[in-house]
Amino acid sequence: MTEMILSRTRLLAARLDGAWVAFVLTLLAIALVDTSYLPEALQLTAGAFLGTLPFLLFAVLAVAYMKATGAETLLGGAFEGRETRMIVMAALLGGLSPFCSCQVIPFIAALLAVGAPLSAVMAFWLSSPLMDPAMFSITTGTLGLDFAIGKTVAAVALGLFGGAVVMAFKGSAVFADPLRARPRASGCGCGPAKPFQGKPVWRFWNEAPRRETFRDTALENVLFLGKWLLLAYLLEAVMLRYLPAEWIASLLGGEGLQPIVLGAIVGAPAYLNGYAAVPLVDGLLSQGMAPGAAMSFVIAGGVSSIPAAVAVWALVKPRVFATYLGFAISGAILAGAAWSLVG
């Protein structure tokens, strides 16, 4: 009997979605601790979500179209030709591709297995989790077009930086035989993992499988992005209520390199989801966070977030993974310093 109860408990836990559970628990906590604030928190959450909804829908439809047409196959051309060209193309396409972290695994594993240089793969790895069409749209709607463009430039620059360093030291022991013997796959619930093969079919609606892919991808992404944004906006409302602005300003505010370095150090382990981070950064900025620290936070956190880090860890040996994290922190600090100067 006890084993049956435990089995059912495990099954229920597996079916529960962490984002929705966190959302409900946060509402319950507000209701218990500060009942009078609950209506205002819900109002702030709903208002912020509705304000972002047009950007969310545009992003969902754009990604679904790319999936249904098979436009992902165009990425293969980035890994052909001279190594320097491959690095540049991989960094550029990494910030534009609709791949989520789990879909990168089979794509990169195949490229490494057929001999694609680690430098180009590293460039793609570093830029890909930082920006994509959905991320750009949501960032624009919440933090503004300037910040979205700045983050895109930083993503491409980080990819170029990492790829160039790997190419320069490709003969060292660190980058020798980088691939694990048996790469592990993982799923993150952000779209079909197997893209269409061959040339893209832009009029996807003429084929039933592609129509199905469009529908499934759009539905899956709107649910995936929607739940994280709702949770993030609720947490933003909580943060604005209970997190002292003076504390944020003293830790991550002001000028100089210190808040930028702290933003990268805090962002690397604290960042769980790129889409949820956008409203949280917006709240931190309103509480006194320095712009440079905000940029270093999203760059370091995006590269080292759990889905992105797991994708890299699943494929390469620990020494290459450690280098990947090193690029995340150093690149984030440089991006934050540059954004501070530009801003």
Image (cartoon, grey):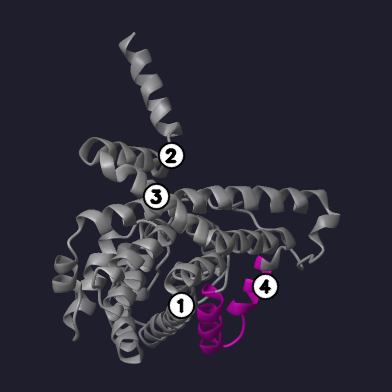
Q: Nearer the viewer, mark 3 or mark 2?
A: 3
Residue beneath disc 3: 231
Taking the spot 37% from the left edge, 43% from the top edge, the residue there is: 23
Q: Quarter-wise, where is residue 36 in the image?
A: top left
- State if disc 4 and disc 2 touch (CB < 8 Å): no
SS class, disc 2: loop
Label whose residue precedes the other's in the sequence (1 or 2): 2
Residue marked by disc 4? 74
Which residue, given by chain and number where applicable, does mark 2 sit on?
A: 17
Residue in the picture at 51% in, 61% down? 52
Q: Which residue is mark 1?
A: 123
Q: Secondary structure at mark 3?
A: helix
Nearest the eye: 85 or 93 = 93
What is the three-letter code of the residue carrying label 4? Leu
- Whether 82 is among the magenta residues is yes
* Residue 40 % position (x, y): 35, 49
Of tags 1 and 2, which is closer to the observer?
2
Of labels 2 and 4, the one closer to you: 2
Label 4, label 1: how many angstroms apart (C-alpha)? 17 Å
Question: Sequence order check: which comes first, mark 2 or mark 4?
Answer: 2
Distance between the alpha carbons at the discs numbered 1 and 2: 32 Å
Please name whichever residue, 223 or 131, is drawn nearer the observer in this view of the structure. 223
Q: Nearer the viewer, mark 4 or mark 3?
A: 3
Magenta stretch prevailing secondary structure:
helix
Foreground residue among 75 and 274 = 274
Crowd class of label 3 (few under 14; some 14 to 19; many from 20; radius 10 Å): many
| Residue type highlighted by circle 2 | Asp
- Which x, y percent locates residue 236? 33, 57
- Is 195 covered by the magenta stretch? no
